[in-house]
Image (cartoon, grey):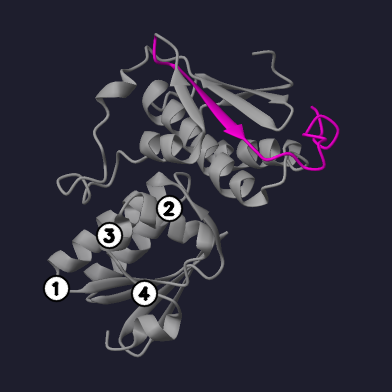
């Protein structure tokens, strides 16, 4: 379980491996905020290897998206499985994020 | 509720995943809807534990959280109790309204209510009970299929 960071062109892609939950949300937050501080402005969070997200995980994505936007950047999400899509739909966060079916689609035009 | 399984866990956020996975293993033979087990029960129970530790026990490492799980046919009942003074669950705002959508917190109880068939609190507000009803699997329920601790 953890977060792998990869630079693709001028986009920082973060892979969420395992869960994004109350126990590890701060780790993701810290990683993205550090990169934002270092000047990165384009982010994709890839959930291809993610089991599930809890409300704290959803909350940290909302918080990060807000902070990235405040700095003139954008944070997109990719590869949500059916369970994760359900959580975003229930909470109406699907209306807040750019959600792509694949990493490639998320990177396009970012 | 006569529990088949009782867990007494430390007030440590890192212990949530292990506790939830343990309960999920005990439920693995219950009913015929693996998705509702995997998503609804797992997320609902995780939310209940996180609320108990963060808000109920106020992150106090000296406190404990009790989890009781009962299996009746294909119905799973899970109760999570903290040592806090409780809260009023009816005063929690709807996180999906435009004014709340950008807030980082406040989705836990909402998700529990959306994902479980029943969610109710005791009068004090320090104990939440989650009920998930699954469709029967070969009319066996989870009495024979689910393991017991």
Residue occupied by mark 1:
A72
Q: Are marks 3 and 4 on the same chain?
A: yes
Q: What separation in Å lies between label 2 and label 1 (alpha carbons)?
A: 27 Å
Q: Chain of mark 3?
A: A
Q: Nearer the viewer, mark 2 or mark 1?
A: 2
- Which numbered disc, 2 or 1, marks the residue that appears first in the sequence? 1
Residue B76 in view: yes
- Which numbered disc, 1 or 4, marks the residue that appears first in the sequence? 4
Camera-nearest residue between B111 and A14: B111
Task: Tell me the crowding category of disc 4: few under 14, some 14 to 19, or many 20 or more residues within 10 angstroms, Cα based.
Answer: many
Q: Secondary structure at mark 4?
A: strand
Q: Nearer the viewer, mark 2 or mark 3?
A: 2
Q: Residue at x 46, y 50 (%)?
A: A24
- Which numbered disc, 2 or 3, marks the residue that appears first in the sequence? 3
Q: Which residue, as the protein is rendered here, is positioned at the far right? A: B144
Q: Which residue, as the protein is rendered here, is positioned at the far front? A: B139
Q: Nearer the viewer, mark 4 or mark 2?
A: 2
Residue occupied by mark 4:
A44
Residue A97 vs B149, above or below: the answer is below
Residues in magenta, as a range:
B124-149
Q: Residue at x 60, y 26 (%)?
A: B78
Task: Tell me the crowding category of disc 3: few under 14, some 14 to 19, or many 20 or more residues within 10 angstroms, Cα based.
Answer: many
> On residue A64, which mark appears?
3
Q: Which residue, as the protein is rendered here, is positioned at the far top? A: B123
Q: Are marks 4 and 2 on the same chain?
A: yes
* Residue B14 colored in magenta in the image: no
Q: Secondary structure at mark 1?
A: loop
- Which numbered disc, 3 or 4, marks the residue that appears first in the sequence? 4
Q: How many discs appear?
A: 4
Q: Chain of mark 2?
A: A
């Amino acid at each position: 379980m953890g977060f792998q960071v990869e630079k693709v062109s001028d986009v920082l892609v973060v892979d969420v491996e395992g869960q994004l939950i109350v126990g590890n949300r701060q780790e993701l937050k810290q990683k993205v905020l550090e990169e934002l501080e270092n000047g990165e402005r384009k982010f994709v969070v890839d959930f291809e290897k993610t089991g599930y997200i809890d409300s704290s995980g959803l909350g940290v994505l909302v918080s990060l998206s807000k902070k990235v936007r405040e700095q003139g950047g954008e944070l997109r999400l990719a590869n949500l499985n059916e369970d994760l899509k359900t959580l975003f739909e229930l909470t109406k966060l699907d209306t807040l994020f750019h959600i792509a079916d694949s990493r490639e689609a998320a990177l396009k035009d970012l | 509720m006569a529990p088949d399984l009782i867990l007494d866990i430390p007030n440590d956020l890192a212990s949530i995943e292990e506790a939830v996975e343990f309960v999920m293993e005990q439920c693995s033979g219950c009913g015929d809807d693996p998705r509702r087990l995997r998503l609804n029960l797992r997320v609902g129970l995780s939310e209940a534990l996180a609320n108990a530790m963060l808000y109920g026990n106020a992150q106090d490492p000296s406190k404990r959280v009790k989890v009781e799980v009962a299996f009746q046919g294909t119905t799973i009942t899970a109760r999570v109790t903290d040592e806090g003074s409780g809260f009023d669950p009816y005063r929690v705002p709807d996180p999906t309204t435009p004014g709340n959508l950008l807030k980082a917190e406040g989705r836990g109880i909402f998700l529990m209510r959306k994902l479980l068939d029943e969610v109710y609190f005791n009068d004090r507000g320090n104990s939440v009970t989650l009920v998930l009803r699954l469709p029967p699997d070969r009319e066996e329920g989870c009495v024979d299929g689910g393991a017991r601790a």
